[in-house]
Image (tube, grey):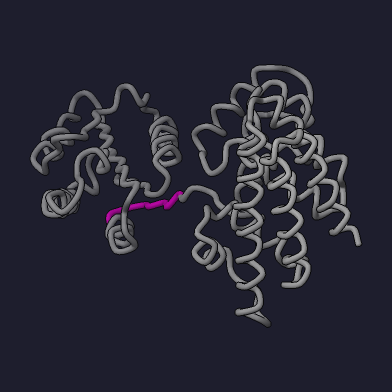
Amino acid sequence: MILSFSGDPFLVRRAAREVLREHGVKPSEAIELGEGLTPQAVVDAASQGGLFGQAALLLDFGDAFSGQAGVKPRNDTLKALQGLKDGALIVVLDPDATPARQKTLQELGTHRHLPAPRFERLPQWVAQELKREGVEFDAGVPQFLADVFGEDPAAIAAEVKKLAVLEGRYDVERVRTIVNRPASHDSFDIIEAIAEGDAAEGVAVARRLVEQGEAVQRIFGALSWQFMLVAKGVGLIEATRPRRPSAGQAAQALGAKPFVAQRALKLAERLDERALRGLLSELLAAEVRAKSGRDPELALESAVIGLAARFGR
């Protein structure tokens, strides 16, 4: 029996270990072949069953084959697996499998592709992980964990396991305290508060960043960069009307990670060129004030209040 997995390395290895357990094999007892793997080594390992029961193999193609030099030995190994379909339990890990290779693996047996969750799928996947571990949580927790850890399934899964050890229900504030790590997109939270016309929340986020040790000029720099992403988003929306740009289009056009591009695009939908020009002018003037020797923190907070007022009009 041959079972194979492709996609995110963490999800692939976790699924492989789970499927071994489902077949009554402890992952530590499976014969694992990675670097130095050859077709003959696979055949020899698969024949080690007999009186001792069915052999169980874990083949890590990611470690075994890389670059152009790995193409022929990998293809030779896939051919060798053709003759082992009905023998040992063989689990193949091929994180970077192309669609063509996924098709080949599917012809050998059961294949599952497990890509890292992205875009709107990320908080949905986080919610599934929390439920999987029996964690009780409020609605905002999956999005918060997605914001903190980004598109890193391994880090999110580890944090969820930590939450599962403790008792009680989790809201965002409790998770924030336990994680003890600032959200990776906090400066974007300022812009989102501005977009809601919520000056108080925007100022609170700005103060939190300063308290965490972020220099005011770095925060201004992040705001400027993120507003430029929003500006590109406005242009992209105009160029693709009446259709809404896809997540992939947004990431490519904005030159940003998909998660960040999605947030910028969402804000861009609320602006036109004239409104955007006014916001950028206000931000530039505030940054100049911060660099002119006046109180930089006051300049930052004043900028947030002024920008929120513009959005609230």
Left or right: 79 as drawn, with respect to 189: left
Residue 115 lies, with reference to residue 160, above or below; the image says: below
Query: What's the residue at 29%, 55% (across, down)?
Result: 105
Would you identify the image quadrant in which residue 262 lies?
bottom right
- Magenta stretch, main secondary structure, is strand
Residue 236 lies, with reference to residue 3, above or below; the image says: below
Residue 281 lies, with reference to residue 171, above or below; the image says: below
Query: What's the residue at 31%, 59% (across, down)?
Result: 98
Nearest the eye: 217 or 36: 217
Point out the image quarter for the N terminus: top left
Nearest the eye: 195 or 298: 298
Residue 229 lies, with reference to residue 304, above or below; the image says: below
Query: What's the residue at 69%, 42% (across, down)?
Result: 143
Is-magenta flag for residue 23? no
Residue 220 image point, x, y percent: 66, 44
Q: Residue furthest top?
A: 166
